[in-house]
Image (cartoon, rainbow, N blue to C red):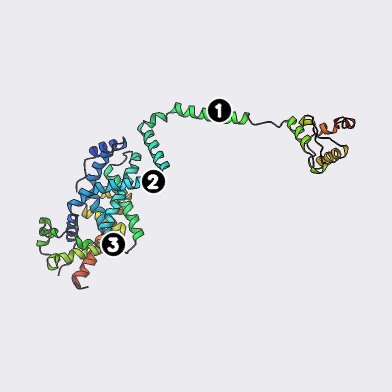
Amino acid sequence: MDEFNDNQITKLLRLKRYEQPPPSYFENFLHEFHRRQRDELLRQPLWRICVDRARDFAFSFNLSTLTSYPVAVTAVLVCAAVISLKIYQTPQPATVAVKDQQVLVVPASTEPEWTLASPAATRVFNTRSLRNLTESAQTHRSGTPRYVLDSVPVSYETTFKF
Amino acid sequence: MDQPRTDEDQQLVARTQEGHASAFDELVVKYTPRLYGLVYNMTSNHEDTNDLLQDIFAKAYKAIRGFRGKSSFYTWIHSIAVNMTLNFLKKRGRRFQLSLDDVDTSIQNDKEFLEATASSSPVREADLSELQKRLNEAMMKLSDEHRAVVTMFHIQGMPHAEISKILRVSEGTVRSRLFYANRQLQNYLDEFRKNPVT
């Protein structure tokens, strides 16, 4: 008996192109495709739908003209301006703020007495606590200036007492 | 199988890219029978073919904005179809269900089929439907890549150059895969002819 040769196999395989589903399958395929697309759209979160719509809107314009050289240069310049503004607006260390901070830092053990004077002068500073504060501040914050507390005259304390 | 007119496809693609979904519908209608034959002969299962075709067109619709026309739409959509089918077959492994026995029985009344089987050959000696079944089984014994090449060349009638573009391999690779696949099919069918009961 003869064996199968290439030509016979080719003929047999070519016949397989006639293996097709019934015509109704192709008629319904597009409807099925639309249905699946709608289902997928309903499953998507709202933000994704918004992003897709925005992208579609962007693509409705000719993006190649928008991404031209002048626009790119402008974008780079705007970015550079924003970055430089950020750099120049970086806050400098203020010495006044440091002084105020030191005045207000009073240990709990000092037991302050409240007066009717302005808030800046409400504390009755006694010498002992001031010394302690100064010493502790010098120990832990030796780098910061403390000439305000040190400059308070001892005789000045009693005038705040009623 | 003749390729569709490229300029017509280009117009439909351009209209789809402009947002006309109806243009893509025309592409779907046009390419569904062609891609059905490709995917079905690679998967041998109607349900898998249907799901894959839906996924293929959905993916194509999402990606069509990025289609720049470097290749024809024909090549592009076939590349998507072949790649997705090969990925699917890798996931599915060898646990396939042959639904090819549901093959349209009208094929045995087809003129070309009768001509092919009328000549003196081993085909005439075997039961035709059984031979079809064995051929399908032999096809499924090929590797996925070899089956893809056989399907595109023998069944779909694509030229070697088109297959090499779709698979992104050289024409020499396509020819060698075809040669190897033909030998494999020949061996399987000869074995069946010698031992028809098995």
> A148 or A158: which is nearer to us?
A158
> B109 or A42: which is nearer to us?
A42
**Residue type pointed to by label 2:** Gln
Compared with residue B131, is residue B34 higher up or lower down, i.e. above or below?
A: above
Q: Chain of mark 2?
A: A
Q: Chain of mark 3?
A: B
The residue at 39%/33% (across/down) is A58
> B67 or B33: which is nearer to us?
B33
Determine if marks 1 and 2 fall on one subunit. yes
Within-10-Å neighbours for mark 2: few <14, some 14–19, many 20+: few
Determine if marks 1 and 3 fall on one subunit. no
For label 3, the residue is B142
Mark identifier at residue A44: 2
Quadrant housing the C terminus of chain B: bottom left
User: Is residue B79 at least partly visible in the picture?
Assistant: no
**Residue type pointed to by label 3:** Leu
Q: Position of residue B153 (x, y in %)?
A: 23, 53
Point out the frontmost of discs 2 and 3.
2
User: Is residue B21 at least partly visible in the picture?
Assistant: yes
**Residue type pointed to by label 1:** Ala
For label 1, the residue is A81
Q: Secondary structure at mark 1?
A: helix
The residue at 45%/27% (across/down) is A71
Q: CA distance from mark 1 to mark 2?
A: 39 Å
Whichever of labels 1 and 2 marks the residue nearer the N terminus, that label is 2
Pick out the residue farthest to the right: A155
Residue B104 image-quadrant placement: bottom left
Q: CA distance from mark 2 to mark 3?
A: 39 Å
